[in-house]
Amino acid sequence: MFALTPAEIEVLRLSLKVATVAVAVSLPIGVVVAFALARGRFAGRLVLDVLVHFPIIAPPVVVGYLLLIIFSRQGPLGGWLFDQFGISVAFSWYAAAIAAGVMGFPLLVRSIRLSIELIDQRLETAAQTLGASPLRIFFTVTLPLAMPGVIAGLTLAFARALGEFGATIVFAANIPGQTRTLPLALYTQLQIPGQDFAAVRLMLLSLVLAVGALVISELVSRQLGRRVAGAVYRR
């Protein structure tokens, strides 16, 4: 029952590719944004906070349509990418990765932000008094202490990317072998009479991936938490 068919392997491979690219590109941006929201005091901070959380409060179809407007060949970014590099973003796996990354971005940022806010700033102050630069403090003190939150955020964003449907189907469409990820494949099977068994297989595969990611994240976060606590205690 659990031997995957070639079509399911293709869908699984594409889904993992899209989700991995989505979180890999989102991570450095998410860390910077999370740190800015956690520690920054600047004009426009509220606007940035609203923009970050917009994919959560807005319907996914709306987010997908906005991405389509921006990245279509007639859009500001999509037109420039096509004219300069010949890259057509809309209705490609790039679009699926962008949609997945955008929808998972709030979860990534929020997890990292909360982790940074829980850090005892006296540790950073101590490093500063020892002559460490702000950049060095961030990479040697702040980021290591926030790493459990980073791992948790990555996992949530990855799981969200694997399950993304609404924005993807609008922005990337449902093209077999190109943009048909697991949720889109499941939706397709549900539209075909007599394909309930195939739909159940895809559903179980999705659940296994999501639960597996969460379990791995929990184990890694606990291990990192113990190491960070031990390192702080030794200091």
Image (tube, grey):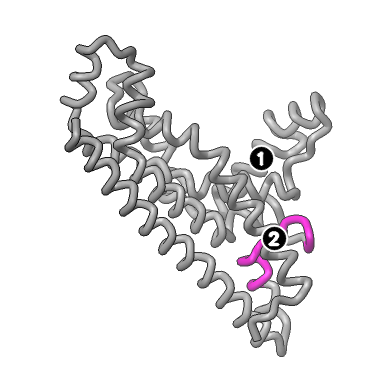
Horizontal and vertical percent for residue 120?
18, 32
Q: Residue at x 72, y 49 (%)?
A: 93
State how far apart marks 2 and 1 are (Cα).
28 Å
Label 2 vs label 1, nearer the camera: 2
Answer yes or no: is residue 53 visible.
no
Q: Tell me: residue 197, above or below residue 232.
A: below
Q: Residue at x 64, y 81 (%)?
A: 2
Horizontal and vertical percent for residue 48?
40, 31
Q: Which residues are magenta?
A: 176-187
Q: Residue at x 58, y 45 (%)?
A: 22
> Across the whole image, how many numbered discs are drawn on residues?
2
Q: Sequence-wise, which precedes: disc 2 or disc 1?
A: 2
Horizontal and vertical percent for residue 211?
46, 68
Q: Amino acid at mark 2?
A: Arg
Q: Is residue 188 left or right of residue 88?
A: left
Residue holding disc 1: 69
Q: Tell me: residue 35, above or below residue 2.
A: above
Q: Amino acid at mark 1?
A: Ile
Residue holding disc 2: 13
The residue nearer to you, when weighing 190 against 108, is: 108
Horizontal and vertical percent for residue 76?
68, 29
Disc 1 is placed on an element classified as: helix
Picture disc at residue 30: none
Answer yes or no: is residue 153 visible.
yes
Is residue 143 covered in magenta?
A: no
Q: Report crowding for label 2: few under 14, some 14 to 19, many 20 or more residues within 10 A (C-alpha).
A: some
Circles 2 and 1, Cβ within 8 Å, touching? The answer is no
Q: Report crowding for label 1: few under 14, some 14 to 19, many 20 or more residues within 10 A (C-alpha).
A: some
Q: Residue furthest bottom?
A: 194
